[in-house]
Image: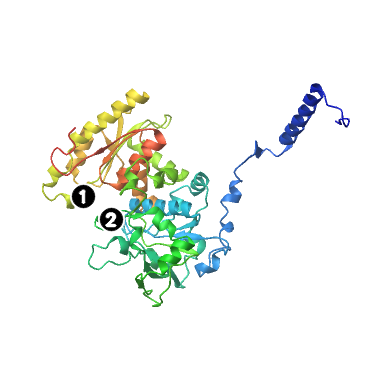
Amino acid sequence: MFFTKGKKPSLRTICAALTGVFLFGLGDLLLKPSSYSLGIQSTPAQSTIFNSQLYVQGPPTQRFRDNLRNDTKYITSWGSAGWTNDVITYGNLIYLALITERIPIIPKFLSNHIDPSAPPFVFEEIFDVPRLSQAIGIHLLQWHEVKDPESQVVDDLGCWTVWETVQQHIEVPEPRRSPSLNVLKLDISWTRTPAWVELTSPSIHHNHASFWSLASLGFPEARSKSLELSLTNHPSPQHQVSLPPDDHVLCFDLLYYVSAHHTWEWELDYSPAWRFVGQHMRWTANMEKIADAHARRAMNVPVTEPTPPYISIHIRHGDFSKQCEEFPVDQCFAPLSVIARRVSEVQEELRTRKGIDATHVIMTSDERDPEWWSDVRALGWTWIDYAAERTEEIYGKWHPVFLDAIIQSNGAGFVGTRGSTMSTLASRRVQTWHDGATRLVTWGWPGADDH
């Protein structure tokens, strides 16, 4: 449309011109590919996001460094505790990867707390990695994708030791060495992190470091200033080489005791590691299927009926008995009557808040006393008999632990043991995934859970 020079266009002409421009733009928008909508770019296809070849040179190599890309920075750490604590450690690792904009390299789980003869278990075989990556917006690498698990080449690597710094109240603090380092054939030269990485005052012995203090070591300014300090460096045990902390692969010895604001933060609802990572660490479909089958058989659910809502319980005794110093174990641990009271509270909350009648109750526990289990049965509750199921024989020694965690997490409600990380994670999962009702039983002295 043209206007005559010197002649003022009429209002009708202006409106017609604007309408034409709008229709042209709308047509252009509608003719664009469907992945584009109102200027908001859609998420790329999963085949692009989750292709490991984008973050490594190719198949696993004999030396891990040969498989790293020069245009990508990485971060890693290793577990050295029980499985649940290692899950928290890897969650913290992935959260640090988010705030440092690095690709995390996750090790396998080791079974020292279950049976040393059980083989290491791959992260992606218990957790749905594509779903996790899509939820948090970054890709996850696993060590077996980077370095050939059969490699006998020992790689040198410089890493930060957090443990030595936060354990200053110990007479001779030292790095936390993980069995994973032997599995991966890594020879680490440790450098002590600066004292300012501690979450709390050095006079308070909580052993925690701060997420952002550790994250700053992955950036040039804090890294260079820290390396100007007289920080303790430990030569690698095999090759006896002293290396500064690697910048291409930022690495720490133990990331379990790390928080943003408060110690033991996974217990708190605002926990950034839980909110931005942990809640997205969902089970694989295969693991869910196996756990559901076990739970259904325990509840005697007919094949034609859906899995009913149930209350899951986790009662940890075992090593907690070491904390029962002032009272006998039978007075230190909460009796079943106290646990039953908490179960009733959860059932009532589910009825009033969600209209769910969860009459089935599944107990998980490390208790070995047959009489205790008989009393559990007398309450009308059930449990998974892994021996009768031949679970270890069919699936492996890891699976009873995995299936307990999955069954706990899938309860409509949950009752757990205060102070147990397994109960903490189960409670978080039930609350976040199912909007469930949860309670944690306090113990340690007679009447500890009275309320």
At 11% from the left and 47% from the top, the residue drawn is 328
The quadrant where residue 225 appears = bottom left
For discs 2 and 1, the disc positioned in front in the rendered view: 2
Horizontally, is 359 left or right of 30 in the view? Answer: left
Q: Nearer the viewer, residue 14 or 322?
A: 14
Q: Secondary structure at mark 2?
A: loop
Q: Secondary structure at mark 1?
A: helix
Residue 427 on image: x %, y %: 33, 39
The image position of residue 356, as x and y in percent, is: 36, 26
How many C-alpha atoms fall within 10 Å of the one at disc 2: few (<14), some, or many (≥20)?
A: few
Whether residue 36 can be seen here: yes
| Vertical relation: 8 (above or below) 187 | above
The image quadrant of residue 202 is bottom left
Q: Residue at x 39, y 65 (%)?
A: 160
Front-lying residue, 254 or 341: 254
Coordinates of residue 219 in the picture (x, y in percent): 48, 60
Q: Which residue is mark 1?
A: 320
The outermost residue toward the top is: 12
Can residue 388 be seen in this snapshot? no
Q: Foreground residue, 279 or 376?
A: 279
Place residue 280 in its image quadrant: top left
Question: Callout 1 environment at 10 Å: few (<14), some (14 to 19), or many (20+)?
Answer: some
Q: Earlier in the sequence, mark 2 or mark 1?
A: 2
Which residue matches tag 2? 201
Of the 4 image quadrants, the one containing the N terminus is top right
Q: Inspect the image, locate mark 1, and give the three-letter code of the amino acid beneath it.
A: Phe
Residue type beneath disc 2 = Ser
